[in-house]
Image (tube, rainbow, N blue to C red):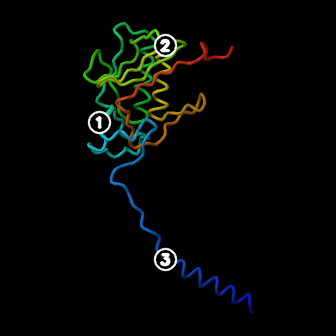
């Protein structure tokens, strides 16, 4: 008898619980996903609506301040080396794979992404800078290899790319990435060689 009573009570509690409505979910009017490059101080993105992300690509909008990255052109030094050209091509390739948008190369531009060409004696051991100066983004190393490392670091830390092994690479889903105007990311490895012999 007690067992039957317990079963009846459990069924009654389940029926009462099922009749309650779950609280309504709230949705934001604009995407709220951000990258690690987004900071609380960046409020300019709110002034321009964020376009919806194309579901065929993992990354939607990338902005430097309030300007879309897709308005920028990639600028190389006048006498670019093979490795600087390769670094620029890698940047263009992985931005396109992430967003579906192709960055163009140019000899000069009002809004430029400079790849290489700004060596700094303070950078050693293939160190590099990723920095925003005025309206421009500069990715430049102490050497050609440093510039290439700078491009890969930009793609990894700011865009969200992950190279998990030689055959598997993926970019995290992100509707909106904002690169702050005060970006000044200098990385100088404490060792001179990145490769084990």
Q: Residue at x 36, y 39 (%)?
A: 41
Determine the residue positioned at 52% across, 18% down: 188
* Residue to which mark 1 is pinned: 66
Residue 103 x, y percent position in the rendering: 34, 27
Q: Give the residue at mark 3.
A: 20
Residue 179: % across, % down: 38, 33
Q: Residue furthest top?
A: 79
Q: Is residue 97 above or below residue 175?
A: above
Q: CA distance from mark 2 to mark 1?
A: 30 Å
User: Which residue is rendered at x = 45% and y = 17% of the image?
Assistant: 86
Q: Earlier in the sequence, mark 1 or mark 3?
A: 3
| Rendered position, 68 above or below 28 | above
**Circle nearer the N terminus (2, 1):** 1
Query: Relative to residue 92, is residue 47 drawn left or right?
Result: left
Assess disc 2: are there few (<14), some (14-19) or many (≥20) residues with their C-alpha within 10 Å of its C-alpha. some
Furthest residue toward bottom = 1
Q: What SS does tag 1 mark?
A: loop
> Which picture quadrant has residue 78?
top left
Image coordinates of residue 60 in percent, x first then y, are: 38, 41
Which residue is label 2 attached to? 123
């Amino acid at each position: 008898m007690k067992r039957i009573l317990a079963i009846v009570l459990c069924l009654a509690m389940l029926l009462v619980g099922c009749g309650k409505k779950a609280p309504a979910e709230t949705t934001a009017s604009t995407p709220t996903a951000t990258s690690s490059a987004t900071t609380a101080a960046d409020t300019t993105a709110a002034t321009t609506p964020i376009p919806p992300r194309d579901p065929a690509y993992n990354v939607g909008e990338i902005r430097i301040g309030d300007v879309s990255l897709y308005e920028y052109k990639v600028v190389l030094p006048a006498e670019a080396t093979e490795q600087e050209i390769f670094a620029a091509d890698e940047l263009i390739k992985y931005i396109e794979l992430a967003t579906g948008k192709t960055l163009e190369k140019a000899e000069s531009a009002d809004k430029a992404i400079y790849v290489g060409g700004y060596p700094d004696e303070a950078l050693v051991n293939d160190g590099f800078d990723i920095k925003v100066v005025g309206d421009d983004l500069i990715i430049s190393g102490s050497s050609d290899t440093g510039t290439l490392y700078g491009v890969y670091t930009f793609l990894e830390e700011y865009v969200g790319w992950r190279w998990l092994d030689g055959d598997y690479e993926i970019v995290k889903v992100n509707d909106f990435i904002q690169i702050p105007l005060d970006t000044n990311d200098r990385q100088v490895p404490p060792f001179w060689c990145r490769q084990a012999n």
